[in-house]
Amino acid sequence: MHGVPESTPRAAVAIFPTFMNSTPGVEAKAEALVEAGYAVLIGDFYGPDAPSNFEAAFAAMTRLRSDPQAARARFRATLELLRELHPDMPHLAIGFCLGGFAVLEMARDGQVLTAVVSFHGLLETLLPADKPIKPRILVCHGDADALVPRSQVTSFWEEMDGVQADWHFHSYAGVEHGFTNPHMLDGSPNPAYNASADRQSWAAMYALFDVVLG
């Protein structure tokens, strides 16, 4: 999905979706960004062979993360397309779940981005940062996320401090993985959805954008 507002975009945002690729929940976030004045592009992790169910998608995510150099090349392709579509404006990146991991990998990779925001993203990496990180970083994390134990949280902080990254980390007590999405793919309620954490994290993203864009 590529979307642009009616007026001149304030900035261009690459949106990295969940491990299920683009979903109605991610597309709703993209539409909200367009309404707020941003151009958006939703990335594609898998291409024409995208998995269609949870088990296949989880397996595909596992394969993708097992080869970090290949994963980063795939993530960079989305940023390259965003820059081609919108070359003369600031570039931002946000991501959900696997997408949160992707935007942090792009920060670690040295990509020129104004800011990156991870929502319930995976923090562990096989290629820790070893050079200065350019974008501002905001991580919005559910403290009860079973996929990201606190040991990984503290390791991430230490990794970011080791390269003098400019980072903010918001952790929401009792909140689980996937807290920004109110519905499952079949339309049923998502038991992990947390309206307060969703609202606060989205507002924090806009606040960061206001700071970095001036």
Image: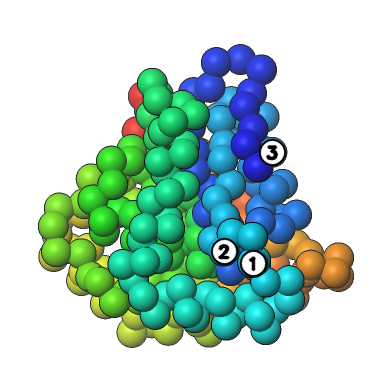
Is residue 173 in view from this perspective? no
Q: Nearer the viewer, residue 51 or 90?
A: 51
Residue 124 drawn at (x, y percent): 35, 76
Rendered-image quadrant of the N terminus: top right
Whether tag 3 and tag 2 are in contact, CB under 8 A, the answer is no
Rendered-image quadrant of the C terminus: top left
| Secondary structure found at label 1 | helix
Mark 1 belongs to which amino acid?
Answer: Asp
Q: CA distance from mark 3 to mark 2?
A: 22 Å
Whether tag 1 and tag 2 are in contact, CB under 8 A, the answer is yes
Of callouts 3 and 2, the N-terminal one = 3
Q: What residue sits 65% from the left and 46% below the top? A: 29
Residue 201 drawn at (x, y percent): 54, 53
- Mark in front: 1 vs 2: 1
Residue bearing mark 1 = 49
Residue bearing mark 2 = 46
Find residue 152 and report its image quarter.
Answer: bottom left
Residue bearing mark 3 = 31
